[in-house]
Image: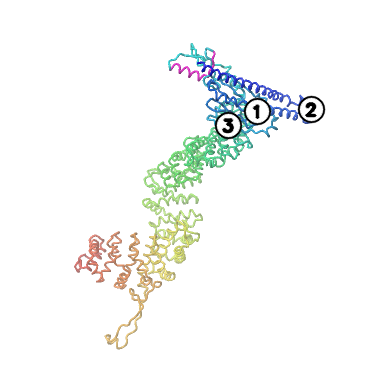
Amino acid sequence: MEAIVKKYQQKFKKVRDEMNRWDELQSHLISQFRNASSIIERLQVLQDPNNYGALNRVDGIVNAVLRKQMESLELILLSMKRTVTSDLCALQQLLVDQPNIPKEEDIHLIVVFPLQFNPSLISYSQKKSLDFTSWLGTKFCIFNTRSSVKSWTIVVFISRIIHHACCQGYLDEMASSWDGSYDLGSQSDESNQFERLYLEPIYDAFVCPLTKQVMSDPVTLENGQTFEREAIEKWFKECKESGRKLVCPLTLKELKNSDLKPSIALRNTIEEWIARNEAVQIDMARRSLNLESSESDVMQALKCVQHVCQKSRSNKHIARNAGLIPLIVDVLKTSSRKVRCKTLETLRIVVADDAENKEMLAEGDTVRTIVKFLSHELSKEREGAVSLLFELSKSETLCEKIGSVNGAILILVGMTSSKSENLLTVEKAEKTLENLEKCESNVRQMAENGRLQPLLTQILQGPPETKLSMAAYLGELVLNNDVKVVVARTVGSSLINIMKSGSIQGREAALKALNQISCYEASAEVLIRAGILPPLVQDLFAVGPNQLPMRLKEVSATILANVVNSGYDLDSIPVGPGDQTLVSEDIVHNLLHLISNTGPAIECKLLQVLVGLTGSPTAILNVVAAIKSSGATISLVQFIEAPQKDLRVACIKLLQNLSPLMGQELADALRGSVGQLSSIIKVISENIGISEEQSAAARLLAYLPERDLGLTRQMLDEGAFQMIISRVVRIRQGETRGSRFVTPFQEALVQVLARVTFVLAGEPGCIALCREHNLAALFIDLLQANGLDNVQMVSATALENMSLESKNLTTLPELPAPAFCASIFPCLSKPPVITGLCRLHRGTCSLRETFCLLEGQAVEKLVALLEHTNEKVVEAALAALSTLLDDGVDIEQGVAVLFEVEGIKPILDVLLEKRTENLRRRAVWVVERLLRTDEIAYEVSGDQNVTTALVDAFQHADYRTRQIAERALKHVDKIPNFSGIFPNRA
């Protein structure tokens, strides 16, 4: 027992010795600090020149005295550093070696660098070793070591005189030689760190015994003890829930009640104390907020500003009055991405819920600078910028300024649809745009950049003036087709209502918007279902005080043209009294009347309406009937010579649609009028590429009656065919490419050129044209225009016509007169042998002169077309081949020619396929001619399929085909060879 007591006595003595040593160290440090404090206090007196009296006559006396005092202060501070370096380490060892030190005691060291105002906190606890490396490297430091409960207390408080002196610049000379760098170390809680950075001492009365934090709402118990309200209420709650007595957590004595009395005086004192410290912290941060400070200094200053501003709104006013906002904005120019991100975050905190700070931040080009960060590569910068803009956009006065920055709304809209941005950034961008919608100019910009919903919402829900302005702006936008459908579905009905019942200004805005969204088929159909047709027609035909101005009638006509050309079935939609529709005769008459009595712009749109109506197989019949009954053909044809290109194109397209049903009327009008046909030919001949107008003009001529000799002669006189031949050859040679109208233009030109082959028998000029330009060879070449079915079909038909004329153009040989004896005794003479004659026509033939298919080697190409997938091409090719077996030629030789090019089987296959009735009719005729040859008849008689096809034609085809099928069956001995099966029918 004595040994144990003796051992503890030794330990106690050792601890007491160490404590005595610490007391001496404390006394020494206090003495040094008093000396330093005296010098600092004198600085206030020495900085006033009035205190120097007669010494003011000495040049530089103030600076010299101040410099001397600063040197003395530096020596004292260096001495304090040596004291701490040599003696305080012993204290560290004491704390490590002596575990008997009470647990609640901590030592806090606050290291303050007064010149740069960068505080660094070093905390010691029994579980962590004391680290002085962060401040021993400096030339001096002022530290505060404080116990939270009792004993070992050293309070070294730097008076605000230090700050005042430094702000006046008297320490700046020494600042250039002192190193102000510091290391914050690792802190898990920055807020807790700044809470402990008080430049004035923390009085015990300020700290709650429960939370160990400075109180914000101190309350007093009945025993006089003071606590944080939230903490003591939690204590009382735990006592009640656990069934314990209500006791004071500090004295553990029972309390009579839980009444809490607010300590107003203490709270006010604490608030004043916090305000003084926060003001100093803000001022310290201000000194580091410049591009010359180190990255760590700037980061620490920004964190300090964030902490102070987050504590209360009043601190934001202090920060603004201290001029921090411009300084923070300047830091955005730094090259450090880390600092830029922290700066954006700090600005957001500073301006949050503070209108005046937002106004100050938005001054100058700051908003533009922030917007530039939206397109930076670093996602953190983009996130910080969009968060700051979101905060600024909460101010309605700043919304317009943000939107005025070029590209701001475009970038934000892009962010909302970006898949590469994080969700937080996308959400902030979306909310920012929602705030910016408060400004009409921003709504317009959003619509221009693809975000239409705000504009549509304004049209639906906005005040009348806003509705009109937004509708008018909608009419100015360029929308893609998908967006037009969305717009039509969203605001189509609203726009139609404005168009029906609004003022002239409102109707104009609505018409412009409807014009924009009606030019796509799908959106036009939406408008039709919404009821746009009746008011449109009413606006066009209305007369009187409520009628639209002519410029708006033009817009109405444009919308009607768009709607009609959408392809929607308009036959059942009433647009006038008595359930009249657009294709009713009266409506068409009104349209024709307007066309004749308005200006070119409206005439063009109304002609486009008729173009759309005549594009429907059912509506065109009514339109044709109305045109014929009104006698409007001549007036329509006259628009071909209109100087306005759009008007000419609309007229030509309308006439093109009408030509299949009014071909002869149009041909008569073109022949009888002066200049219209020449105008069409001139349009086709223009060598400026291939336009829609040229294509429509060529198709108009192509659809006119092909056997109209008068029209063909007039075209021949106009030189139209020579020009067409030239254009076809150039297209065939590949000189004209890249136009979507090349194919229809080429097909129409070939069809127009084929007109000359239909009148060869009665027009020597056409024969001469064909010979001069070797049209037969051109049509044979066009047979190989793969992919152009119409060109191949028309070329085969043209070759059929030319081949039919070959037997009339072939020159028969002149036989020499027989000798006298041969004339008396024919048996004694031999017939003359003439070589070089055509096998088919028994005369002199050539492709150029007589259009002989055999001489032009066209038979094989025509046989190849028999396997075409288009029935019309096959029918035309078979018709051309049938000319080889026609009456007036050597049929046996024709069969031989087909046999030589292996054309017999393809012809039989056409018969077997029975694709169309016309094709079967033509195939039966050709097969019957083939079966006249015994060898072929013998071969075919063994083919049951061919026989079955002929029997089917014999039983089910038309009268003429049944007769031909009967003869064919006789050739293969399937029907007895006697007549009388069919009575003779006229």
Give whichever of discs 1 and 2 has the lower sequence position. Answer: 2
Check residue 499 for magenta coloring.
no
* Labels in figure, total: 3
Give whichever of discs 1 and 3 has the lower sequence position. Answer: 1
Any part of residue 312 in sight? no
Q: CA distance from mark 1 to mark 2?
A: 38 Å
Residue range in magenta is: 224-241
- Tell me which corner region of the image, top left, top right, bottom left or bottom right, holds residue 900: bottom left
In the rendered image, the vertical position of residue 338 relative to residue 746, given as above or below: above
Residue type at the position of mark 2: Asn
Q: Secondary structure at mark 3?
A: loop
Question: Going by the image, does 567 lie left or right of 898?
Answer: right
- Coordinates of residue 677 in the picture (x, y in percent): 46, 61
* Cβ atoms under marks 1 and 3 closer than 8 Å: no
Q: CA distance from mark 1 to mark 3?
A: 23 Å
Give whichever of discs 3 and 2 has the lower sequence position. Answer: 2
**Classed neighbour count for the residue bearing mark 3: other residues with Cα under 10 Å, few (<14), some (14–19), many (≥20):** some
Which residue in the structure is indicated by mark 1? 82
In the rendered image, the vertical position of residue 81 relative to residue 530, given as above or below: above
- Coordinates of residue 929 in the picture (x, y in percent): 27, 69
Q: CA distance from mark 3 to mark 2?
A: 45 Å
**Classed neighbour count for the residue bearing mark 2: other residues with Cα under 10 Å, few (<14), some (14–19), many (≥20):** few
Residue type at the position of mark 3: Leu
Which residue in the structure is indicated by mark 3? 184
Which residue in the structure is indicated by mark 2? 56
- Coordinates of residue 261 in the picture (x, y in percent): 53, 14
